[in-house]
Amino acid sequence: MTTQQSIATQLAEAGKKKQAPLTEDECLEILMDNELPMVEARPQVLECDVVRFQNNKEKWVAFVGLMNGKPYEIFTGLMDDDEGILLPKRITKGRIIKQKNADGTHRYDFQFENKRGYKTTVEGLSGKFNKEYWNYAKLISGVLRYHMPLESVVHLVSTLSLDDESINTWKVGVERALKKYIQNGADMPEYDEEEEI
């Protein structure tokens, strides 16, 4: 069994427990990066929230793309000027723009407005973030796009069995970022975005 098949099995099992609408085969197709029909087409521009968290004493950022006010996709990476993204602390909202490259591939850019109202665009989010974290975030985005209930998505992410300690603490940060959007989440604790995970 490949790693992708193993994760697809875990996703499907967690989904069954929470009555999620994805089968193991559908999870595997998402992981293999096949095009699956989405419930609604992604517009070129999505509003997004910027959520900061810490992972093993490193500062991280999550961009949560919103459709109709609900999480539709998530991108995560280091907040680092050399290898990641460095944003002013006051930036909590922006836009994720899907662009088509000359070779036919797609990239996602993040755009925000500075204090004077001028737009600043950070191009190529995928090129700035660790590929492994990027792929897990792509998987989570795929599940969000199928309208799996957010409580189930958070539970699904929490039940992923990952070997690396760093990716496990990253996973907790993603859970916490998504919990912000759960209505009446009385059993889901609040957290400080700068809190160490």
Image (cartoon, rainbow, N blue to C red):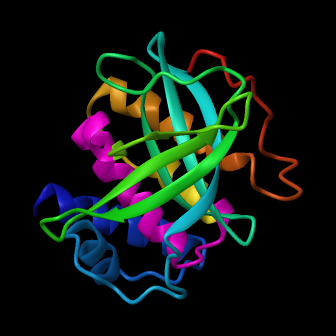
Asked if residue 166 is positioned above or below residue 24 in the image, the reply reads above
The one of 121 and 84 positioned closer to us in this rendering? 121
Q: Position of residue 172 (x, y in %)?
A: 53, 35
The image quadrant of residue 133 is top left
Asked if residue 178 is positioned above or below residue 193 in the image, the reply reads below
Picture mark count: 0
**Residue 145 located within the stretch drawn in magenta:** yes
* Image quarter hosting the N terminus: bottom left
| Horizontal arrangement in the rendering, residue 79 relative to residue 151 (left or right) | left
The one of 47 and 8 positioned closer to us in this rendering? 47
The image quadrant of residue 30 is bottom left
Q: Which residue is drawn at 55% across and 71% down?
A: 17
Q: Where is residue 28 in the image (x, y as percent from the top left)?
A: 25, 73
Q: Where is residue 38 in the image (x, y as percent from the top left)?
A: 46, 85
| Horizontal arrangement in the rendering, residue 146 relative to residue 49 (left or right) | left
Q: Which residue is drawn at 49% across and 46% down?
A: 110
Segment tinted magenta in the rendering: 126-151
**Residue 94 located within the stretch drawn in magenta:** no
Q: Which residue is drawn at 30% across and 46% down?
A: 126
Asked if residue 103 is positioned above or below residue 155 in the image, the reply reads below
